[in-house]
Amino acid sequence: MPLTGMVEQLFGLQAQLPRPPAVGLWTRLEGFARADLPAACSKKLVVRGTAMRGTIHLMTAKDFLAFRACLQPGLDAGLRAILKERAQQLDMAALEKKAAAFLKAPHNFEEVRAHLVDAFPSGDERAMGYAVRMALPLVQVPGQGPWGYPAQADFIHAAAWLGKAPAACAAPDALILRYLRALGPATIKDAEAWLGLGGLTPAFERLSKTLAVVGGTARVPLYDLPDAPRPNPDTPVPVRFLPEWDSVVVTRADERVVAKSDRPRVFLPGLRVAALVLVDGFAAGSWSVARTKKVATVTVEPFRAMTKAIQRELEAEARALAAFMEPEATGFALEVGRV
């Protein structure tokens, strides 16, 4: 599958930091190289911008243009929840107009806030900056950095970067179908939580004749597309390393990937989600990579004991991960913690 096909299949990858989506693609794609993602971003095939739940995501340009407007009600609700009474003091129409004109060219948000303060001297600088980030369809400009983006990337209006504005959105129905194709089976609450949108029950009811119920309960059914792949439970699954905030983990409130007893070690303070080792498709430990001089060390903290066969597979995959993440290292070490 090409890189853009995988980004589309996943309906985006969470990208608060530049590195995790690259690791997420490497763990899924055969032959994926570090330079592939920066190249796709520079060609504007994929973009990194504010999307679901007000979080930075890596999405195909096609998906961003098609569905960014459908996410806006959730972004508006998030803006009100964060700013509270400060939001009521903002003239959003004037703010959006001023910021949209300024962001026809790339700017970082320190520059955006300074521009808004010049235009609205009595305004709340931080509130205005946050409101613009949530209200406008913005994408980040790729540049210097080992993962295709600098630590503090410039933002630009999507219409200026991609040559067209995001499409209007009359109803979330197409968005729900797109979500299920990427991340189903799912409950209505799963969809609402991932998309950052409330009140999706009417849309699911409209779509009920086109959806399949594949599990759950009578009160909380699991929906999926009728032709979606549902592999046999005995299908072999190789050891895989998932990055921080991977969508496979973030989208699941149940125990399909992470056991209830392991959740405190996966969902961490500060809204962090640990990078995970999957064994047979289930979370079996967390991992990190560090380079000291020329040695790249992969550290795994297992949630439970692993067989010798799994340990051998783990070491082979960890060695490949280290080579991908630390290509300048000439040595490799794997450290596995005690259970």
Image (cartoon, grey):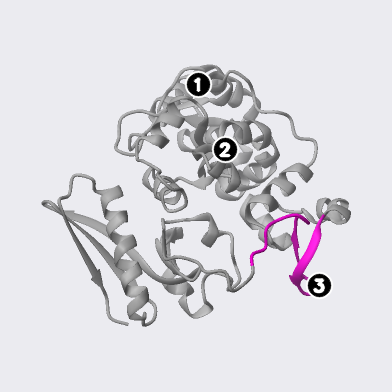
Residue at (53% x, 55% y) in the render = 247
Few, some or many residues within 10 Å of mark 2 (<14, 14–19, 20+): many
- Is the C terminus in the top left, top right, bottom left or bottom right quadrant? bottom left
Residue 222 counted in the magenta span = yes
Helix, strand or loop for disc 2: helix
Residues at marks 3 and 2, CA–CA distance in whole angstroms: 34 Å
Quick check: 209 left or right of 194? right
Looking at the rendering, the stretch of residues picked out in magenta corresponds to: 211-231
Q: Nearer the viewer, mark 3 or mark 2?
A: 3
Do the residues under discs 3 and 2 have CB atoms within 8 angstroms? no
Q: Nearer the viewer, mark 1 or mark 3?
A: 3
Residues at marks 2 and 1, CA–CA distance in whole angstroms: 14 Å
Please indicate, yes or no, whether residue 121 appears anywhere in the rendered image: no
Give the vertical position of 196 relative to 61 (above or below).
below
Residue corresponding to mark 2 = 134
Quick check: 69 left or right of 56? right
Residue 82 locus on image (x, y percent): 56, 49
Q: Nearer the viewer, residue 202 or 74?
A: 202
Helix, strand or loop for disc 3: loop
Residue 171 counted in the magenta span = no
Amino acid on which the number 1 mark rests in the picture: Leu
Residue at (53% x, 35% y) in the render = 133
Residues at marks 1 and 3, CA–CA distance in whole angstroms: 46 Å
Residue corresponding to mark 1 = 103
Amino acid on which the number 3 mark rests in the picture: Arg
Residue corresponding to mark 3 = 219
For residue 302, what is the image quadrant?
bottom left
First reached walking from the N terminus: tag 3 or tag 2: 2
Q: Nearer the viewer, residue 9 or 97?
A: 9
Helix, strand or loop for disc 1: loop
First reached walking from the N terminus: tag 1 or tag 3: 1
Residue at (80% x, 60% y) in the render = 212
